[in-house]
Image (cartoon, rainbow, N blue to C red):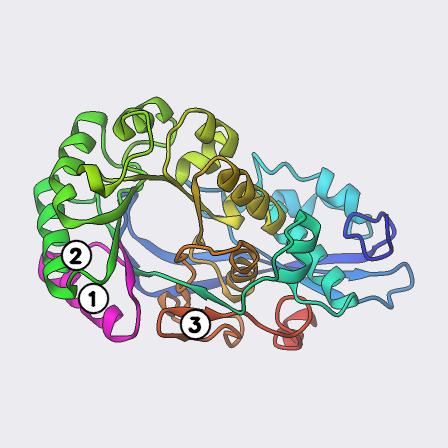
Amino acid sequence: MTADDPRDEEAVHTMRHRPFALDLTRPLGTAHGAIRRREGFLIAVERGSDGSGAVGLGEATPLPGWTESREACAAALDGLDDRAGAGAALEALDAASTPAARHGVSLALADAAARDADERLADRLASEAGIGATPTDAVPVNATVGDGTPDETAAEARRAVEAGFDCLKLKVGARDVDTDVERVRAVRETVGDRVALRADANGAWDRETARRALDALADFDLAYAEQPLPAADLDGLAALRGGDRLSRANGRVPIAADESVAARGIDAVLDAGAADAVVLKPMALGGPDRALAAALRARSAGVDPVVTTTIDAVVARTAAVHVAAAIPDVSPCGLATGALLDEDLAADPCPIDDGRIAVPTGPGLAGDAFDDLRRW
């Protein structure tokens, strides 16, 4: 191992964490219920046995249904030795049972190593993953449109398009199928054919309902339907796809897996032929490193990777931008979620312009943008 390897046992001198809580500007309606508040932990690690190395910053913001509970995340972080080496810290955290906790520690270690090496996190992630292409400087993103009446949904979609987005993800599944079809119809009629539409059911439908919904939604040229069935039903997702990769050309809606990836793992989803696209949440997968590895595994199987967040605070959102930037020719990602928060931990270093989000150019996560957060 080199001195900059984030798994170097001598790399971490101290490790600490503190809680935070952030309200959303308004509840985000999903098939699992409304999300109103995000609670998590900031994590800091200082590299070097003499305390002279860079301080890396991480974020663990659990979201039950995708990750562990806040209580389980807190217990996992409390159980870490604050003077442990990097390898010992990561080995003590289980990505399957406490992915948010592992995400926070993994990100803090990677940020510290990248800052010490004076390189962007995206460049370091790409290099460690063996990606030859240089990460992009801007990532295409979609806007998320929450549950609402057809008129409310169409109005929110119109505002997103006016703000420059050309890809929208519509939350469905909280209402009956006929109402959701009218909501999607209203959006398509409002935004026209040039805007890509995705529908996200968050696993709300059973097989019969999903088939009926997808048959009706096929008229609206959807890029894909995200998680139309519960996370565990990989056979059902494969059946909805019809076995082979499908496309709008044959009148069927492509299928994306989200919760299934977190619950069953990327290999199980791909082996089952359950998805045309996979939605990868670094927080739910256990860290930026694991999310990028999953993206490359999907690409190798001919499945499109999309990076998104669990409505995280600014530190984890910025890390997800770096993950997306490291994926060559990445599709629009679900990273434009900062506006959903009523307040944040710090100013956002990733501005959005015309549906693209800028990747910070400074070392690590964002140069000195988060320096105030590293001190407590």
Question: Which percent across, then down, holds residue 355?
Answer: 36, 69
The amino acid on which the numbered mark 1 sits, given as a three-letter code, is Glu
Question: Which percent across, then down, holds residue 112?
Answer: 74, 62
Whether the residues at callouts 1 and 2 have beta carbons within 8 Å, the answer is yes
Label 2 CA crowd tier, 10 Å (few <14, some 14–19, many 20+): many
Give the magenta part as a residue range: 145-169
Mark 2 lies on residue: 148
The quadrant in which the C terminus is found is bottom right
Residue drawn at (82%, 57%) of the image: 4
Question: Which percent across, then down, holds residue 231?
Answer: 37, 32
The amino acid on which the numbered mark 2 sits, given as a three-letter code, is Gly
Ranked by sequence position, the earlier of labels 1 and 2 is 2
Q: CA distance from mark 1 to mark 3?
A: 21 Å
- Residue closer to the observer: 295 or 114: 295
Task: Place residue 372 in its image quadrant.
Answer: bottom right
Whether the residues at callouts 3 and 2 have beta carbons within 8 Å, the answer is no
Residue 335 lies within the magenta run: no
Q: Secondary structure at mark 1?
A: helix
